[in-house]
Image: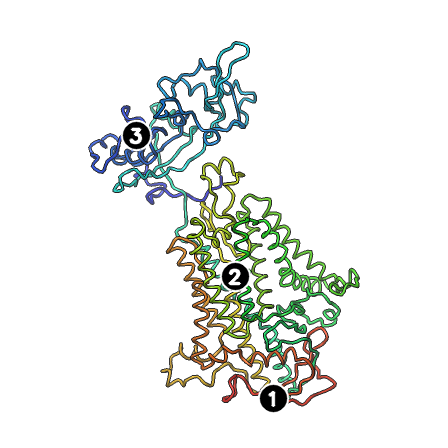
Amino acid sequence: GDYPPMAAVGGMSPDDKDDVHVLTVPPADNPFLCSNVTSSSPQSLAMNYENRVILTPRGVCTFETKAMNAQYLLGAAGIIIYGTLESRYTINETSQEIAFPKKSSDYECNHGIAKIPAAALSFDPKPYNAPQNDPILSGEHSGNICLTNSPDNLENCPSKSCLLTGDTEVDPGTQEPLMVACCAWDLHVWLYHDSSLPEDLSVTIPSFYATMEQGQTLLRDVGNSKQVLVKMYQRYRPSTNFSVILIWAMGVFVCAVASYMSADDYRKATTHILSKRSTNGNDMGNTNGSGDIRQNNDGRARSRSPSSRTNGNNGNNDLDRLEAMPSSYQTQDSAESLELGAEHACGFIIMASSGLLILFFFKIYNFVKFMYAFGCSGAVTQILAYPLVTKVMGNILKIQDRIVFRTKVMDIGHIYLYEMMALILGYGVGMIWLIVAFVARNPEEFTFYWVTQDVLGACMCIMFLSIIKLNSIRVASILLIVAFFYDIFFVFVTPLIFNGDSVMITVATSGGPPKADPSWCEKYPDDEDCQGGNPLPMLLTVPRIGDYQGGASLLGLGDIVLPGLLLSFAARLDAAKHLVGLMGGGSGTLHSNTCPTDSMMGGKLCCRGLCNGGYFFPLVIAYGIGLSMANAAVYLMNMGQPALLYLVPCCLGTMAYMGYQRNELQMLWDGPKTIRAADNLVYGEEGPPNDGRHVPLATSEHGGYQNTPSTVEVEATPVPSAVDDPINNR
């Protein structure tokens, strides 16, 4: 196949003559290299085999025993163990009867079967007479009676060799006994460790396994008095797992972008204010605007008016076209927003635990793939597909949007051309991904599959953080601390309950790694015990780069969105301070008036950074540090880690410490009034404002900020700046 580059064992270059050795066979009195090895084995026996590679047959003793003898008794530079038919026959120590090869493990009758006259075979000496039997049971020649007696001439048997099953029949015509023979497997096998050998001895020479066909080729060359030179290579494996770096960068990027975009409404309002300030010479008119059901102080869900909330999907601000579109696929404008409370945090953990246990016990992993594809396709449609369609069709191709299907169903509304194309694109990609997931045996080997899975997951994170909100670190602390112990329990504690199986890791890998032996799975890849190990959707994945042994680096979406809720809160708080500060007549510069002076902090840049500026960027750095600690722990402990074990202390601890340094910790705990004020400015309140606060910014029917004041202007008393006012910093 197309293998990665291979390097010579010992680090020698391919042109190094000192790394080329003569191939030879074992001594005649020890053909299988199965003499007992002890720690005091003499080195004097190595005179004739020093710096040679020994070619020895499989059988009689373990692989490691052969390698030990080659190294310690003969001083060989390497060993090649080749497969034989003889090695598959043994003697039962109790009954002294012949133990024939095992069905499926050693042979497969569905690949070829033949009936061999018993008179042509010999089992003297027991258990198998290789010199007499091998020529008539192997090879593509007329002397192979297994091939000639097979109905299909062993057409489907790659090895063209047969093993006797031990079953016998009688020829109906001659009444002679027949023995059943089936196609022998001839594959590479693992050279397994032998725990019974002395612990103070270890194999340091290169040890390879060759198939029966390869071994016979080498034996013929050595037997023809040719000097066969051998240079031994090992498969290349990168010393650094770059996929860890990529998954770290991807996790930090997705978490930061999704959190930052959740405050997009505030930034759009700020841009509108600055634009009017520059146009009107700082004379900001307060205008009345349309509202909807708003956030109550009890923390329950509210429905916000559209306000172009996410990704700027219409570069030309074609307000007339957006006004005509009732569908939610314009942006996330019409999506409802849910502010989490303590009851939601507890409910989340109960639902997450229940879902995880259901997957663990019932193993409905295909159902998860199905739901992931459909759920994330909607997010892709809204986050990527609709903006792309609008840009290409509207701005580049100049195709006007129009109604394609009319319907009176209020929840659906009319179907427009742009949204239909976005639906086709978004769900089309999701369905292709789903087909690959169900059809391919190892779908993660396809670049399209894992890249698309990561894009689907990233869009879902952005959608989640644009809808779910936290407005205090009190709720954030409850949610993250409970999730902290939830993650630890399902990774570290559940193996003590479920016979060593970690619920989290088992579910994340679709049931855990295959239970069957790798050699068995190479023969029967569709066997039930050979399934599993493929990363389950609901996570980001990057395969190990350039590693022939496979594997991937994984990051669960929960490890992004749960800390992301705190980062989203920080981003919204920073943007709200800027917005309310501008509306109060200030500059909107983010600094704390309660911070100690430079002389009190010693003028240290790090202290000024913690005390001044926003919360968002320090939390992004804290998230990156926590995620890097989780990745480092995976390699130090050589096992999967609960990422929240490292992310929660880093993120929550950083925000709490920064709030303490700024004397804002109580404000963060109770919920900043700045965010409430910013919500009132951007989204309005129920009924007309009558308490002296700012009226909401005027909006058009489709959610865009108006550039002209409303026909009715209301005099409003400015709210004190939450940023620049030295008295009221909340």
Instruction: Kindly identify the amino acid type of the residue bearing the numbered disc 2.
Output: Gly
**Residue 89's quadrant in the figure?**
top left
Q: Residue at x 55, y 50 (%)?
A: 447
Cβ atoms at labels 2 and 1 below 8 Å apart: no
Sequence-first tag of 2 and 1: 2
How many residues crowd mark 3 within 10 Å: few (<14), some (14–19), many (20+)? many
In the figure, is residue 418 to the left or right of 8? right
Please state which of residues 554 and 684 is positioned toward the viewer in this rendering: 684
Residue 30 bears which disc, if any? none
Please name which of the two marks, 2 or 3, marks the residue nearer to the observer: 2
How many residues crowd mark 2 within 10 Å: few (<14), some (14–19), many (20+)? some
Sequence-first tag of 2 and 3: 3
**Residue 290's quadrant in the figure?**
bottom right
Residue 718 bears which disc, if any? 1
- The CA distance from mark 2 to mark 1 is 41 Å
Q: Residue at x 40, y 59 (%)?
A: 632
Location of residue 591 in the rendering, given as x and y in whole percent from the top left corner: 48, 82
- The CA distance from mark 3 to mark 1 is 93 Å
Sequence-first tag of 3 and 1: 3
